[in-house]
Amino acid sequence: MADLTVWLEATGALAGAGGVGFAKARAPRVYWSLVGMPLAWGRFALSYRSTMDVCGLTVQPSGLRAFMTRNVARREVQPVPPKIRRVRPTSTGLRVTLRLPAGLEPADVIASSERLRHAWGVHSVTVVETKPGFVELRMTGYDVLRRVRMPRTAVPHDLVVPVALREDGTAFERDYRKAPMALTLGANHSGKSMYQRNLIKGLAQLPVALVGIDCKRGVEQSAFAPRLSALVTKPDDAASLLAVLVAEMEDRFDLLSLHGVSDVWELPERLRPVPVVVLVDEVAELFLISAKKDEERRERIVTALIRLAQMARAVGIYLEICGQRFGSELGKGATMLRAQLTGRVVHRVNDKQTAEMGLADVAPDAVPAAGLIPMERPGTAVAVDSTGGWSKIRTPHTTRAEVVDACREFAHLVPDFPALDPFRPLVPAEVPAEGPSLVKPRPVID
Ligand SMILES: Nc1ncnc2c1ncn2[C@@H]1O[C@H](COP(=O)(O)OP(=O)(O)O)[C@@H](O)[C@H]1O
Ligand SMILES: [Mg+2]
């Protein structure tokens, strides 16, 4: 009998250990909530003071405090670490808010983040200054970019679309009002189209007009036709479409001057024209020409893009440009256009120059990080924040079918926009799902 109990206990323990190991590898969120987080929290609470001390994140107490400790409390005077203001567990890690004592600055904590990560045995520690005197340590318990799941609170709103997950477990949002024009770079197969796909899925749910320019014969964007106000797949059509958008921009400026305002958002809501997001996939197709006769078309396209990039923000027209490279080799106007594109996302690149094209002028210290993105992690990128900082992000894997469904569901949000009607894509009729055949099979020989 005793043998049986021991055997049962042993198998139970083994199954438990196996289950924990399985959860750690396959369901890291569950593992974190049940096992990882209590352990990390415990380790953090027990070793906080000593860890901060050895990492050089303490200061000598003030004269009065040292005097009181020595003479009133009759204790040894110890260095003071930052005060813990709040510890908040999340589904991916722990967030700790610290009040910095006089004499420490956020840069000191940032410099020690790698040491803190090892001391507390967490996957990563990111330090963010929340307000003067306070920093937040964002710890993640596991590699959140391995299989990306967006936080539940990340939903598109106003003109803000959560498109990817940051390394620290927060959502990376594309905010059109903060960074109206953006550039996404990356080698072939690095995940640029996936990024745009995620963006389209989010934008589809907002009251905006979506305009697609996809000169790869529409292979990426034509499936999203139900939600697009315009789609062009040839450079000639792109030239005409951009001319229409420039004319629209001028009309909108007339409207602004009529009402004496400088921005569409200052107009009363009923007068405000609908925001337009222009999504360009593979921008080089618009710049490169194979024959001399196309030069004039190129000129028109580039001029229109530069004019839109320079001025269209105020009238609610936004550019979202994707390309493999974006340097002076694209010819006249390329670097001028690039300078207007504030938002930058750089996926895996094949050469340092491409990373520099995207990042060197806005966040030079992010260039090496872009060169280190591994090939087996498509969708990973370095993104520059509107504040000038940068972070590593990865888009969730979203299938084309999911985005097509979103485009169908929100097809009613396609705004009334007569100027774009000539470019409105044909919406493929819905193919009825294959059901059981109503025709009764009849044997051939009877
Ligand atoms: N975030 C992601 N997670 C998993 N796979 C991805 C992700 N992003 C892209 N991929 C995969 O990588 C491949 C290339 O992506 P794609 O967006 O077409 O690259 P690009 O447009 O840069 O050539 C596709 O097969 C896609 O499924
Ligand atoms: Mg692509």
Image (cartoon, rainbow, N blue to C red):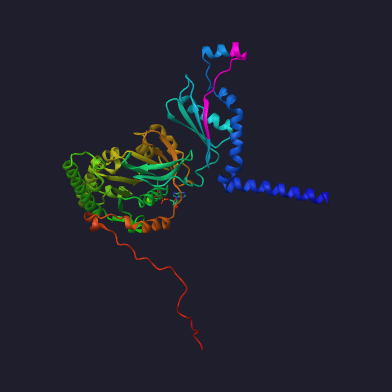
Give residue 220's position: percent from left, percent from top.
Answer: 36, 55
Give residue 317's position: percent from left, percent from top.
Answer: 27, 45
Does 70 appear in magenta?
A: yes
Where is 307 relative to 244, above or below? above
Where is 18 relative to 60, above or below? below
Q: Which of 338 and 146 is in front in this view?
A: 146
Q: In this view, does 351 lie to the left or right of 8?
A: left
Does 57 appear in magenta?
A: no
Furthest toward the right, the residue is 1
Furthest toward the bottom, the residue is 446
Q: Which of 37 and 385 is in front in this view?
A: 37
Q: Is residue 378 left or right of residue 77?
A: left
Which residue is drawn at the image coordinates 57% and 22% (left, top)?
A: 53
Give residue 158's position: percent from left, percent from top.
Answer: 34, 45
Where is 95 relative to 108, above or below? below
Q: Nearer the viewer, residue 172 or 364?
A: 172
Which residue is drawn at the image coordinates 35% and 52% (left, top)?
A: 204
Give residue 267's position: percent from left, percent from top.
Answer: 23, 43
Where is 420 relative to 29, above or below? below
Res 310 quadrant in image? top left
Res 366 quadrant in image? top left
| Residues in magenta, as a range | 69-87
Which residue is drawn at the image coordinates 44% and 52% (left, top)?
A: 398
Q: Is residue 368 left or right of residue 266?
A: right
